[in-house]
Structures are given as C-alpha cells and as structure tokens.
C-alpha cells in the first residue's frame, strides 16, 4: 500500500504540468481533465484516510496530494472566462456546473478529512500559505472554501470540551492579515473565517459559541456562493474589519500556545519582502501585544530573532516596530526579556544597547526589571557553571558572564527618566550588588584593563542618578575610580566608598542600613560578600552611632565572631576590641565575652590570635564583678591553647592566663582548681624551643605559685634549669595539694605521645617526680599503668628520651617492690607519709640540650630539700 501511495505522489507533478492553465487557450476537454484528476485525487486521499497507515505518514501523504490538487484547481481562470468557452447557453451552463463540481469535490475532500480528524485543519493553514506564495491563485475562491470548512468544523465542535487543532493560531494570523485587503470580498471572507476559527478555539475555553454560528451562515450548503449573497450585517460587530477588535478578539479567545503561534507568524511577516504585508503585520502585532502580551510564551525566541534582524540591514519602519515589540514584551514578561538580553557576548554591541533602551521605555515594570538585574548580579563573573544543564546559554559557555552584562545594562537603564523612582526604591540593593561586583571583577584576569569594569561605571551612574554627585567627585579626588580595578585595593576601596557616603550624610542612609542589617541576618552567599557587608556596615555605624552600637547590631558582631569566614571573624573582633572603653555599658557583655571564647577553637590561627588580643583588651576595662563571674570560664578556655601547635598562640595563652590570675587575685579560691589543671602544660613547655613560650611559662608559673601560696617557691625562676624547677613544684604540690598528684600524673601521661621530643623528655621527668612524691597514694595497678606508658618510649627515636625513660622505669620498679598487698599496712604507710613529709631529691641530673654548655645554674633546693 505504501509503495502505491509513493508512486502516485511522484506522478502528481507530471499531471500538474499537463493541466496547469497559465491563461493559455483552453477547451472544455481541459476542464474535464481537471475534473478527472481532482476526482482521482479525492479517491486516493480517501483510500489513504481509511488505511492503517501511520498517522504522520498519512497526513504528509494527503497534504502532498491536496497541494497538487490546490495548484490545479485554483489555477483555473474565473467562471466568466470559463463560460466564454461555450458557444451556446446550454454549453455555458454545462461548463458552469462542471466548474462548481470541481470546486465542490475539492471542498468535499477537505470536509471529509476534517470530519474524521480536526487536526487536519492544518491543511487550511497550508492553503493560506500556498495562496500567499503565488498571487496568481484566486484568493477569494480559496478563502471561501476555507471559511466554509471552518464553519463546518465549528458546528461539529458543539458540545465538545476541547479540540486538537494546533494550527489555529497560525491560520488566524494568515486570515487576520487579509482582513485589511483592498478587495472587500476577500476582507469579508477572511472575517468570516476568523469568526468560525474563534468559535472552534473557544471550545478549549469552555465556550462553544454555538448560538451565534447559525447567524453567520444562512446558506446551509457547501456550494461556493458569490460574495453578493453575504450581507455584511450578518458579521459580528467585532469582525467588521476593525483591526483593534480583531486583535482583541483573537487575544482573548486563543490559548497562550495558539496566541504565541499567532504572534510568531505576524512577527515573521515583519521581515517579509512585501512592504504592505509587513506594515499590516506590524499593526496587528502591536495591537495584540498591547492587550495580550502576557499570554505569549515564546518571548526569548522572539527577542533573539529581533536581535538577529536588527543586527542586519532592517528598514527604519521595521526597526521601530521590533523595538516596540521589545517594549511591549517587557511590560508583561520583564524577566524573560531581561534574561534573553543577557544572552549575548560582553561587551554589548550597539544593537543590544538599542534593545536595552527599548526595554527601558516601559516605566510600569521598572521595578521588575531592576529586580531581575539584581537577581543576575548575585552571580559571580567567571564562576564555573554546571555543564550538565539542559540548556546552555551561548554567552556563558563554561563561565558565567551575565553579571558583567547586567552591570553594563545598568549603565543604560539607570539614567532613564522613567526609572528614577525605581532606582530610588532599590538604591541599597543596587549599591551593594555593584560593590560585590567590583570585588568579583577585580579578581578576573583580563585582556583589557577596562573590559569588564562596567560595575565601576554603573556605580558612578547610580551615584549621579541618586543625587550623590558630590560623592562621585569626592571619590574621584581620592583616586578611587582609577584604583578600584586593582585586586589589592578593593577592600580598602569598599571602606572608602562607605566612608565617603557617610561623610556626605547621604539621604539613603536609613534604607541602606536596613538593607545591610537584612543582608547580615540572612547571611551572604559568598566569602567576599560577607567581608564587604561587615566593612560597609561597620563604617556606616561608626559614622552615625557612638560606641557601643545598638543591641540589634551588637548581636550581628557577636555572631560574626565565630563566622566560617576568618576575615569576617577578624573584622568583627577588631570592632569589638575598639569598644573596650565602653564595654561596661553593653548589656549583653557576658554573651559577647563568651562568643570570643568560642573563637579560641577556630581552625584559623589568625582568628585565635585576634580573639586573644580582643579578650585581653576587654578584660582590662571590664567591671570586676562581671569579670569575677566569668573568670573561671575564661581561665579554663586558656588551658587548651597552652598546647596549641602555634608557638605565638601558646605564649599568648600562657601569659594571658597569668595576667588573669593577677587580675583576680582577690578571688583565688575560685581559680585554684584551674591553676592546678594548668600546671602540667606550664611545666612541660618550660622546655619549649621557642624562647617566648619559655619566658611566658616562667612568668605565669611564678604567678601560679603565689596563687597556690607556695612559700618555698622562688620569686623568679629565670636562671634555673628545668629539672630543679620540676622538683621544686612537685615538692610544693606534695606539701600543699598532695591529693592532686594522681590527676597531674594522668595529664602528664598524655604528653608521652606528643610528636615533639622536648615534650616527651619533660613528661618523663615530670612523671618520675610526681610518682615519687605521690607514691603513697598510688596502687599497684596505678604503677603498672604508668610503667607501661613509660616503657613505650624506651624505643623512642630521641636517645635522651630513652635514657630518661630507663631511669624512670627503674624508679617505678623500686616503688612497686616496696608496695605491700596488705590494706592495713598500706593505710598506715599513707598516714605516716602525711605526718612525716619527706621531700624528694634530684634524680635525673638532666640539662636542657640547648643550655648544657651554659654556666651551671644556681641550685634552688638548698633550702627546700631535707637530707
């Protein structure tokens, strides 16, 4: 069956060339040939229609046959010319009847196809296209058939909820263009056709409009009727040739998809070679979009086509119409238009700038346009995009350059007079978005220095459009505009902009402050944005508020202390430190101090150092009563930092701990437990390779001795070797706080696993002396645990650690040997040791490797060790 169909289709072209009229001399036999051909075509079409052929192939086959028939039927001369063939009245009547029969066969074929499947109304649209392609075809005759087929379809649709006829939008465009034809009969047929088409389309909207169909069709048959029979009074009022009413009716009735097709066909006719048709299309397009642009869904495609056409050699009239289309589409779909206008390479060419101006002509949507641009400005130029996106924008490639295009667009839109109110409304958002873009753009490697700095230009335009010309001039005098593109300058540049705005008391301050607060609470999306926000906010607050800031803003700075971005944390700590003179005026001072303590656990060493400095500066001014309520928590927070990997942090934490003890000398009873807890790191880090850590330990250890009331401890241990200091400390602990020895032993054992050799050496010595001092407190199990820990370092890579470990092991074995299993004897021995205190003598004869060749230190045990 399929092979037969293809064979017949191939023969159609030969048939067409035989019977085509071209106004040559013809005879009645030629008319009979046409009749035979059309009749055969109808049979072929109907046979295909009833076969089990794929629907798509079936339609394509029928369309080709219909097209061939169309070119034969509508190439016939007029009825008057046909009648002239006959020599008698009878022959003329026969020829007229044959003529109408041919037309009826063609029309009946269409009716049969449409009655089976309304989708085949698509053929009517193709007929309109064929008719417009060749003006030799009689348009009135074609339109009459189209009109009657549509009328038939509209009646058939009565009672149906929907119809599958996707061609209605395109067909409506073809018919609407003929409603202003010079020939009144063509205008009337096109108007009827539109009306019937709208009746069909209204079925999809739940309105069959059936009550009005009969009013428009009095004939009740399918014969072609002269236009004189049709009285114009029967036409609906909306279809009397008024283009405004036609556009309004079509826009109201067609669904968004169909209306989009309608608009697209009209738009494509703008670039048609026929100037009359282009002008008519421009008029209809403008009228439709003015009322129903919101229903158009193919906005991006239209905008892109306009860009392509304007980039070519379009006429002045068509250029004006296309720009007007941009304006009308922006009115209802600003987001789609704006995003499409960003979809071109940077920098924008003259055509794109012209389109920007057109988009800016619609003042009613200025806020929506600026919102869309602000949304785009949230992006970061050069940021890698996800290549798996379904639709890639041509201007993006793998890098997002839309924010740069948005900045350039602002240079065009902000000066527009109709945007003045919207610019004032969105000043804070625009200001900060451009500040972010300045920072982002300065980090892009550019071929040209000024190529991507539209953010700078847009910022200048924003200032001048907002009545801040003096700010612009002041920044120019400070050489800001020239230096802003330098990477090392942009943070200082942010400070400079904020400071200059504050100096000129810019009237937008309240709105800007509210937006910065909102931005701070919501949290920035990027590291750079957080830094810019805190710099800008801090500078504005410094200018318009005295320290301390209002509580609402202090909460922000307190939260920023522990921000994931180290730069934000340090800026916040810096500002908090500057408020030290007024720290006691802050109601939530305790929360502020605690947030600083939390910063001690930051992974960034510079944040920890800044937190230590800030806390110390606040404590120097803090009320003693509040200080005393926090001193234990603060002291406890210093202890982990004493073992920090960074020597600077270690030394600061140890020294600040000592200063806290001096500050709280009246509250010694509150801090004794923390002091005892800190003794192990303070002793062990006396062996630190960093001089500043050693000096801090000696200073703080002396303060701790005074805190614990060790009367036998020297006032200064600057020139005493490590082992003697350890011995003195252990003796004093044994005398004053003997029960803490086991806790100190437990803490010391942990340092045997340290990666630093000097800590392992010091830990072995301290463990030995603590074990000797507290041997009466230890059980056999305790000694075994200690021995196992020390035995692990017998194979240490450091020979000095191994030697010290051997001495300690022998010492522990001796202690274990003297232990008794009797509980009574052990209790008596402990009681004896409490009554008769025997101080320990030096055991290791240890000298710090770095000071082994120095002059022998003064012995500090002459007055402390009993023989």
Image (cartoon, helix red, strand yellow):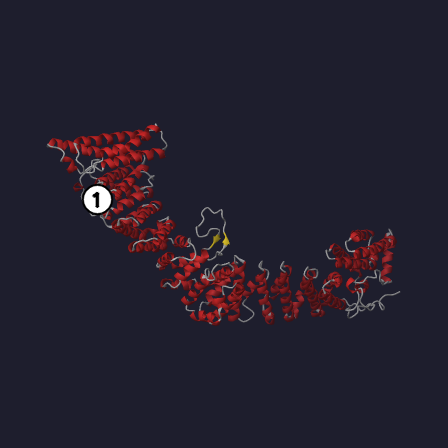
Snapshot quadrant of residue 170: top left
Q: Residue at x 28, y 55 (%)?
A: 317
Q: Position of residue 396 (x, y in %)?
A: 46, 52
Q: Position of residue 714 (x, y in %)?
A: 79, 69
**Residue at disc 1, secondary structure:** helix
Extreme residue in the left direction:
88
Residue sitting nearer the eye, 490 or 116: 490
Snapshot quadrant of residue 582: bottom right
Count neighbours of disc 1 (C-alpha within 10 A) and say few if under 14, some if 14 to 19, many if 20 or more: many
Q: Position of residue 46 (x, y in %)?
A: 29, 30
Above or below 845: residue 121 = above
Extreme residue in the right direction:
867
Residue tagged 1? 186
Q: Is residue 508 left or right of residue 57?
A: right
Instruction: Answer whether residue 790 is visible to the viewer in this image.
Output: no
Q: Residue at x 59, y 64 (%)?
A: 570
Above or below 192: residue 637 = below
Quarter of the C terminus within the rendering: bottom right
Counting labels gives 1
Q: Residue at x 32, y 48 (%)?
A: 268
Quarter of the N terminus within the rendering: top left
Q: Residue at x 24, y 45 (%)?
A: 191
Above or below 616: residue 190 = above
Instruction: Answer whether residue 738 is visible to the viewer in this image.
Output: yes
Q: Position of residue 280 (x, y in %)?
A: 26, 50
Above or below 510: residue 158 = above
């Amino acid at each position: 069956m399929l092979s037969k169909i293809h064979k017949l289709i191939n023969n159609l072209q030969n048939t067409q060339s035989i019977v085509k009229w071209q106004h040559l001399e013809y005879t009645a036999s030629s008319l009979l040939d046409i009749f035979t051909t059309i009749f055969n075509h109808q049979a072929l079409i109907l046979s295909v229609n009833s076969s089990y052929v794929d629907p798509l192939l079936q339609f394509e086959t029928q369309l080709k046959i219909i097209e061939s028939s169309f070119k034969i039927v509508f190439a016939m001369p007029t009825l008057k010319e046909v009648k002239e063939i006959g020599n008698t009245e009878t022959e003329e009547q026969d020829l007229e009847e044959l003529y109408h029969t041919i037309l009826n066969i063609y029309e009946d074929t269409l009716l049969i196809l449409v009655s089976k499947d309304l989708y085949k109304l698509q053929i009517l649209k193709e007929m309109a296209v064929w008719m417009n392609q060749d003006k030799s075809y009689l348009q009135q005759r074609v339109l009459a058939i189209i009109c009657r087929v549509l009328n038939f379809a509209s009646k058939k649709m009565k009672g149906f909820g929907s119809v599958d006829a996707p061609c209605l939008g395109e067909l409506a465009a073809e018919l609407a263009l003929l409603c202003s034809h010079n020939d009144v009969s063509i205008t009337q047929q096109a108007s009827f056709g539109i009306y019937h088409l709208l009746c069909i389309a209204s079925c999809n909207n739940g309105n069959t409009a059936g009550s009005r169909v009969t009013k428009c069709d009095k004939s009740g048959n399918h014969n072609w009727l002269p236009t004189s029979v049709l009285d114009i009074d029967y036409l609906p009022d909306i279809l009397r040739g008024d283009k405004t009413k036609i556009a309004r009716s079509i826009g109201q009735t067609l669904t968004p998809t169909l209306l989009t097709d309608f608009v697209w066909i009209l738009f494509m006719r703008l670039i048609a070679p026929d100037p009359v048709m282009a002008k008519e299309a421009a008029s209809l397009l403008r009228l439709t979009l003015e009322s129903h642009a919101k229903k158009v869904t193919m906005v991006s495609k239209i905008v892109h086509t306009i860009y392509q056409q304007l980039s070519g050699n379009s006429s002045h009239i068509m250029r004006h119409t296309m720009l007007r289309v941009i304006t009308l589409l922006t009115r209802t779909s600003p987001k789609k238009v704006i995003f499409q206008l960003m979809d071109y390479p940077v920098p924008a060419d003259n055509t794109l700038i012209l389109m920007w101006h057109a988009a800016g002509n619609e003042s009613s949507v200025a806020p929506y346009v600026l919102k869309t641009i602000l949304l785009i400005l949230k992006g970061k130029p050069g940021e890698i995009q996800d290549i798996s996106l379904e639709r890639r924008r041509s201007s993006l490639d793998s890098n997002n350059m839309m924010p740069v295009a948005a900045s350039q667009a602002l240079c065009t839109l902000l000066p527009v007079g109709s945007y003045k109110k919207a610019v004032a409304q969105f000043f804070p958002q625009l200001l900060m978005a451009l500040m972010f873009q300045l920072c982002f753009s300065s980090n892009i490697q550019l071929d040209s220095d000024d190529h991507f700095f539209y953010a700078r230009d847009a910022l200048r335009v924003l200032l001048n459009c907002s009545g801040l010309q003096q700010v612009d001039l002041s920044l120019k005098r400070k050489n800001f505009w020239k230096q802003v593109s330098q990477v090392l300058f942009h943070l200082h540049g942010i400070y400079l902009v904020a400071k200059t705005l504050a100096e000129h008391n810019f009237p937008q301050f309240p709105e800007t402050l509210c937006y910065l607060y909102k931005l701070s609470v919501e949290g920035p999306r990027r590291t750079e944005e957080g830094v810019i926000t805190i710099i800008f906010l801090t500078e504005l607050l410094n200018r318009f508020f005295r320290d301390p800031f209002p509580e609402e803003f202090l909460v922000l700075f307190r939260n920023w202390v522990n921000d994931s971005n180290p730069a934000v944390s340090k800026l916040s700590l810096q500002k908090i430190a500057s408020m030290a003179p007024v720290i006691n005026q802050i109601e939530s001072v305790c929360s502020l101090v605690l947030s600083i303590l939390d910063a001690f656990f930051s992974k960034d060493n510079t944040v920890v150092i800044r937190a230590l400095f800030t806390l110390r500066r606040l404590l120097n001014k803090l009320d003693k009563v509040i200080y005393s309520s926090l001193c234990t928590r603060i002291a406890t927070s210093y202890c982990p930092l004493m073992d920090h990997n960074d020597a600077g942090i270690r030394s600061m934490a140890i020294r600040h701990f000592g200063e806290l003890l001096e500050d709280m000398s009246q509250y010694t009873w509150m801090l004794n437990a923390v002091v005892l807890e800190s003794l192990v790191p303070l002793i062990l880090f006396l062996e630190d390779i960093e001089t500043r850590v050693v000096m801090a330990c000696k200073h703080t250890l002396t303060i701790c001795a005074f805190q614990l009331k060790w009367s036998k401890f020297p006032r200064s241990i600057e020139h005493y070797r490590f082992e003697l200091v350890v011995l003195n400390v252990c003796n004093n602990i044994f005398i004053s706080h003997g029960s803490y020895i086991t806790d100190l032993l437990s803490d010391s054992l942990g340092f045997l696993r340290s990666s630093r050799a000097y800590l392992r050496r010091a830990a072995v010595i301290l463990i030995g002396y603590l074990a000797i001092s507290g041997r009466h407190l230890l059980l056999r199990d305790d000694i075994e645990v200690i021995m196992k820990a020390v035995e692990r370092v017998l194979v240490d890579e450091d020979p000095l650690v191994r030697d010290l470990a051997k001495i300690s092991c022998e010492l522990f074995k001796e202690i274990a040997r003297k232990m008794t299993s009797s509980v009574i004897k052990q209790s008596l021995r402990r009681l004896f040791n409490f009554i008769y205190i025997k101080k320990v003598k030096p055991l290791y004869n240890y000298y710090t490797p770095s000071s082994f060749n120095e002059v022998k230190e003064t012995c500090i045990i002459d007055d402390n060790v009993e023989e």
